[in-house]
């Protein structure tokens, strides 16, 4: 079965083709991505209206590219999957509209996928795919969650951020340090040259006993240091970046270990944009090694948003026996859509 996946929830247009046959992990035949980073850079962040318009421009050329690279015809596609949420409403509508138009034209079913489920399952496309059950650390620009994952669709929330997400903490701190958008990778690069012990920054909720996170205070602490340094900032920028990264990574790492202890599971899966962070990977690798825990990451280029994870999530849902929707092609998007709602059945999104 051939599944075409379309991602358009934020500032990346992603398209991919996945083949699923039998019970094994579906195979990625091809994918293509257009990042809008350059376009938004001038504004210091994502401009939703510009994002939507650019998705419109990119999605069909990218689809053609993926089909050509995979050596498949559009007519061979069996199911079209798109990101139904969460994300920017206008941006989501582009992917949903195009997916449904393709579905109607081809007379094929269309499946709306949860963006975070895509991230969560993306490590299955790596050379060393995980096995269920596992603890998942989901760290993106909008979400920071620890989940217990027993099977496709069986997700139990263990803890989450009560304010800013980890990616947001990276991005906002980077802005205070005068680094461009997107701040996370820029801050991580600068941090490589700094001393992480030079500034004492808070690690909120570290000893709270639960698995929740809080990163809003960190941003305030970074601002205080920036103001204190004044003209001296330039010569301490790398040290402050390294200290900020250390605070975020420390909390993510320790809470992940607590989640593993509390669940008794011996497998950790890391997903989402912040999962690309090298220091986070170094610390998690070290902490997991001493505990005999296996840790899995997505391929570096599949950590941030992409179409492959959307096609994969649809394929794995179908393998798990989900009913395909009837071909009504009436669609909606869910800009706010908690991942655990899928498991709890609060919103019955599959099929749309
Ligand atoms: O998963 P993602 O592409 O989009 C969302 O679903 O939100 O994650 C984007 C987030 C941004 O906050 C970005 O700054 C962060 O991931 N990020 C990083 C790194 N690469 C991306 N943060 C720290 N270190 C990185 N290397
Ligand atoms: Zn994402």
Image (tube, grey):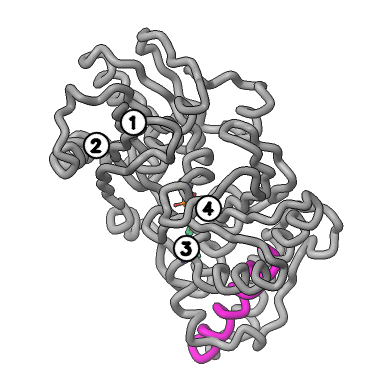
Viewer-closest of 70 and 333: 70
Cα distance between the residues tagged 4 and 3: 8 Å
Residue 6 place in picture, x, y as percent? 33, 35
The answer to whether residue 87 is left or right of residue 39 is: right
Q: Are marks 2 and 1 in contact (CB under 8 Å)?
A: yes
**Secondary structure beneath label 3:** helix
Q: Quick check: can you spot residue 55?
A: yes
- The picture places residue 278, in percent across and down from the top left corner, at 50, 71
Task: Look at the image and give the residue range highlighted in magenta.
Answer: 233-252
Q: Earlier in the sequence, mark 3 or mark 2?
A: 2
Q: Secondary structure at mark 2?
A: helix
Q: How busy is the neighbourhood of tag 3: few (under 14 within 10 Å), some, or many (20 plus)?
A: many
Say whether residue 9 is visible. no
Indicate if the residue with disc 2 has its beta carbon within 8 Å of ligand 2.
Answer: no
Q: Is mark 3 within 8 Å of ligand 1?
A: yes
**Residue indicated by mark 1:** 95
Q: Residue 289 in the image: x percent, y percent?
A: 65, 71
Q: Residue at x 38, y 38 (%)?
A: 26
Residue 191: within the magenta? no
Q: Say which residue label 4 marks.
A: 271
- Looking at the image, residue 282 sits to the left or right of residue 64; the answer is right
Labels in figure, total: 4
């Amino acid at each position: 079965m051939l599944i075409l996946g379309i991602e358009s929830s934020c500032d990346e247009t992603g398209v991919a083709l996945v083949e699923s046959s039998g019970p094994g992990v579906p195979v990625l035949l091809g994918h293509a991505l257009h990042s809008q980073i350059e376009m938004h850079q001038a504004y210091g962040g994502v401009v939703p209206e510009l994002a939507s318009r650019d998705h419109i421009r990119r999605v069909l050329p990218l689809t053609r590219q993926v089909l050509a690279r995979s050596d498949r015809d559009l007519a061979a596609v069996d199911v079209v999957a798109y990101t139904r949420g969460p994300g920017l409403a206008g941006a989501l509508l582009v992917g949903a509209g195009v997916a449904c138009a393709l579905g109607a034209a081809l007379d094929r079913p269309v499946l709306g996928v949860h963006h975070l489920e895509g991230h969560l399952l993306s490590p299955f496309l790596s050379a060393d795919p995980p096995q269920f059950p596992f603890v998942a650390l989901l760290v993106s620009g909008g979400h920071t969650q620890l989940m217990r994952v027993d099977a496709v669709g069986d997700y139990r929330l263990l803890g989450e951020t009560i304010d800013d997400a980890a990616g947001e903490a990276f991005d906002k701190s980077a802005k205070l340090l005068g680094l461009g958008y997107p701040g996370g990778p820029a801050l991580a690069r600068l941090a490589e040259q700094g001393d992480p012990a030079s500034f004492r920054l808070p690690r909120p909720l570290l000893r709270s006993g639960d698995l929740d996170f809080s990163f809003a205070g960190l941003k305030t602490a970074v601002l205080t240091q920036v103001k204190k340094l004044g003209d001296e900032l330039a010569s301490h920028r790398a040290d402050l970046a390294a200290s900020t990264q250390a605070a975020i990574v420390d909390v993510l790492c320790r809470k992940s270990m607590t989640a593993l202890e509390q669940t008794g599971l011996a497998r950790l899966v890391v997903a989402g944009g912040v999962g690309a962070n090298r220091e986070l990977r170094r610390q998690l690798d070290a902490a997991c090694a001493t505990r005999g825990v296996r840790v899995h990451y997505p391929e570096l280029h599949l950590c941030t948003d992409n179409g492959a994870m959307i096609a994969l999530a649809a394929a794995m849902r179908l393998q798990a026996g989900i009913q395909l929707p009837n071909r009504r092609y009436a669609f909606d998007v869910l800009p706010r859509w908690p991942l655990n709602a899928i498991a709890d059945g609060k919103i019955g999104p599959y099929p749309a």
